[in-house]
């Protein structure tokens, strides 16, 4: 099968789309089900990404090692797999810590708290030269295998990421149809009432936040592998904005919301406009990122002002209950 | 003196003992109870004027309102060796597991959950709600379908796959959620307020059946007909304390006290 039509840029664009859909599913569980606001998506994702770079054994571009240099007893792909797992756990710990701090806060408090966390991750990445290489970044992160060309390697990684995101999506879909999902929704919608029915609402939210944050870290670690090179610039607020805007555009309370929303935002920008729109080259380098940020930023303002239900609309438990339990 | 009574009556039900319990809001004492035991009789009424502190006392029992001082203890029936539990040291969510359950005076519901959802939420045990139990819905429904349908029929609730629509439906659903928790001690805060007569009758019947099956029930109501009809014992609360206790007949004999607080025409009922 010829894959000539698949440029490396397209593979990368598709990877971003897949990754953002995965992040959308995770944020959907936090915000759409349990009602937890997260303005710090990039913090958990970035924590996973940097933790991967550091644990795997990336080094500064000059070749100098970072402070943490694990003497791996085995090579790739196991070294990379172990690093992805550890990075996921690190992001989960971040989620546990932040989840514990924001538990009991209202939505505004949660948004500010998580935003602050993302800012801290960014500052650490920029200032801790020995640990993160600061502005110089972390390099030396290649695919944990070589099946021929860079493009082929990237395609395989895209497949791996797609499988993981499909699994996350399937889990999300099942959660809607399980007592656990109902517990999350109940906790999100009326915490005192849920508590009076015997539900440990704080613990429920904390545990869910921890696991979904770990999931964001997992996707960040996957991203570290495909970009090969980490800099603090990658930890911009635009990652958070993209996930939130996509999720809410699609429908925050619906399983398919993130899919539709990401296709219409990230998909449109990173693939259609980036690869196929006939803009002059200088545009892409200078104007496009700015335009993108402005559009995301403005969408977010609209979202906060009008709290729209998104294209798919509101949660429809009545339809769901009818379909699984009859009338 | 209340404890003496406890010793003499054979205790076959769960009781709740409130000792030295006080609560004030912005410096104003709302509840101040020296020693009170609830649940010595199958159905007990708790009455008193608006603002007497009835709801606050119930919230203190559930520990959804923090006590300024004092303790609330769940006393098990004789022969139950699980031991007494100090409820005021436990989080609210632990109450349902101990069998202590309360309905709400103010209408409460989950905004987007259907009646099936509400009922299934009540009956689901913690181990069925674990994050990885993604196939637990069908067995949970099958396990509890019969009792859920029983209560739907009993209160004439239709379309359980929809949300509770009217205020009355929400009020009944709130009661059904609590009944499905199989309480050993049930507190009802104005359960018939706003309900039409036929449904008020249904709620009273449900209370009688529950009490007959061994649950201790405490009812707060402004509709004194309900209280005189249902209660084996009545506690009259005013200004944060219980000032009168006795059978409905005994309470009604204190006409002056009752009318002072509740207005004329209440005693005859
Ligand atoms: N959270 C609160 N903050 C401040 N004041 C409160 C609070 N809850 C109750 N109160 C006050 O405490 C007093 C007792 O209220 P409570 O609701 O317990 O009365 P009640 O006996 O249930 O009255 P009703 O019959 O009207 O339901 C009232 O004056 C009320 O305004
Ligand atoms: Mg009240």
Image: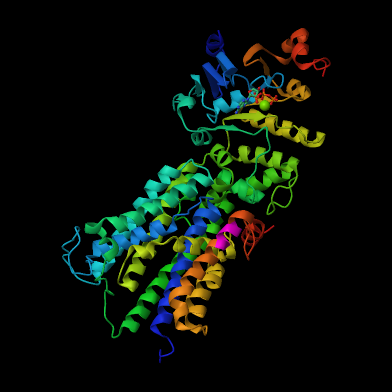
Q: Could you tell me if residue A247 is visible in this image?
A: no
Q: Is A35 left, or right, of A113 in this rendering? A: right
Q: Position of residue A30 (x, y in %)?
A: 49, 54
Residue A23 is at least partly visible in this image: yes
* Magenta extent: A298-303
Instruction: State the image quarter where residue B183 is shown.
Output: top right
Q: Residue at x 52, y 51 (%)?
A: A34
Q: Observer-nearest residue: A106 or B229?
A: A106
Image quarter (top left, top right, bottom left or bottom right) of the C terminus of chain A:
bottom right
Quarter occupied by residue B252: top right
Relative to A299, residue A152 above or below:
below
For image coordinates 24% across by 65% down, the residue present is A56
Residue A90 in picture, x, y percent from top left: 32, 55
Which quadrant contains ligand 2? top right
Give yes or no for residue B154 being in the magenta stretch. no
The residue located at (34%, 54%) in the rendering is A123
Q: Is residue A306 left or right of residue A255?
A: right
Question: Residue B181: percent from the left, percent from the top?
Answer: 58, 39
* Residue B123 x/y as whole percent: 56, 44
Looking at the image, residue A10 lies above or below residue A81? below
Q: Nearer the viewer, residue A156 or A116?
A: A116
**Residue at point 72% right, 24% down?**
B230
């Amino acid at each position: 099968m010829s894959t000539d039509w698949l440029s490396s840029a397209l593979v990368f664009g598709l990877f971003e789309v897949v990754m953002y859909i995965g992040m959308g599913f995770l944020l959907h569980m936090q915000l759409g089900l349990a009602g937890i606001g997260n303005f710090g998506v990039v913090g958990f994702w970035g924590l996973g990404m940097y933790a991967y770079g550091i644990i795997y054994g990336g080094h500064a571009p000059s070749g100098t090692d970072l402070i943490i240099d694990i003497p791996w007893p085995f090579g790739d792909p196991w070294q990379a797999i172990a690093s992805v797992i550890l990075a996921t756990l690190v992001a989960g710990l971040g989620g546990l810590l932040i989840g514990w701090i924001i538990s009991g806060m209202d939505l505004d408090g949660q948004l500010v708290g998580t935003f602050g966390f993302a800012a801290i991750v960014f500052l650490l990445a920029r200032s801790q030269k020995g640990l993160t290489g600061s502005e110089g970044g972390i390099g030396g992160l290649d695919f944990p295998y070589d099946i021929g060309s860079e493009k082929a390697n990237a395609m395989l990684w895209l497949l791996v990421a797609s499988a993981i995101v499909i699994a996350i999506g399937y889990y999300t879909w099942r959660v809607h149809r399980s007592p656990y999902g109902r517990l999350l929704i109940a906790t999100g919608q009326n915490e005192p009432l849920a508590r009076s029915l015997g539900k440990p609402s704080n613990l429920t939210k904390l545990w869910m936040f921890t696991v979904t944050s770990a999931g964001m870290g997992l996707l960040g670690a996957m991203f570290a592998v495909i970009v090969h090179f980490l800099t603090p610039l990658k930890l911009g607020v635009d990652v958070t904005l993209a996930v939130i805007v996509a999720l809410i555009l699609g429908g925050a309370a619906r399983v398919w919301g993130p899919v539709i929303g990401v296709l219409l935002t990230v998909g449109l920008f990173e693939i259609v406009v980036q690869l196929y729109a006939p803009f002059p080259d200088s545009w892409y380098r200078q104007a496009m990122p700015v335009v993108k940020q402005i559009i995301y930023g403005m969408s977010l303002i609209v979202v906060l002002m009008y709290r729209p239900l998104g294209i798919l609309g509101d949660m429809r438990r009545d339809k769901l209950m009818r379909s699984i339990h009859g009338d | 003196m209340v404890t003496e009574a406890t010793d003499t009556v054979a205790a076959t039900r769960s009781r709740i003992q409130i000792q030295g319990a006080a609560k004030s809001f912005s410096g104003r004492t709302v509840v101040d109870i020296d020693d009170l035991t609830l649940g010595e009789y199958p159905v007990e009424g708790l009455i008193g004027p608006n603002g007497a502190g009835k709801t606050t006392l119930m919230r203190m029992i559930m520990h959804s309102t923090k006590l300024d001082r004092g303790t609330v203890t769940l006393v098990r029936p004789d022969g139950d060796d699980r031991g007494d539990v100090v409820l005021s040291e436990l989080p609210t969510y632990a109450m349902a597991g101990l069998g202590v359950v309360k309905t709400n005076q103010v209408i409460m519901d989950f905004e987007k959950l259907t009646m099936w959802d509400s009922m299934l939420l009540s009956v689901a045990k913690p181990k069925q709600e674990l994050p990885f139990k993604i196939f637990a819905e069908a067995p949970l429904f099958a396990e509890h379908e019969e009792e859920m349908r029983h209560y739907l029929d009993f209160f004439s609730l239709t379309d359980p796959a929809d949300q509770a629509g009217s205020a009355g439906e929400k009020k009944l659903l709130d009661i059904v959620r609590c009944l499905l928790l199989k309480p050993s001690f049930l507190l009802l805060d104005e359960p018939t307020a706003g309900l039409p007569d036929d449904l008020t009758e249904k709620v009273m019947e449900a209370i009688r059946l529950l009490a007959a099956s061994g649950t201790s029930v405490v009812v707060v109501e402004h509709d004194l007909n309900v209280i005189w009809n249902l209660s084996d014992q009545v506690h009259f609360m005013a200004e944060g304390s219980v000032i009168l206790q006795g059978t409905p007949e005994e309470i009604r004999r204190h006409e002056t006290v009752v009318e002072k607080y509740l207005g004329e025409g209440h005693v005859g009922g």
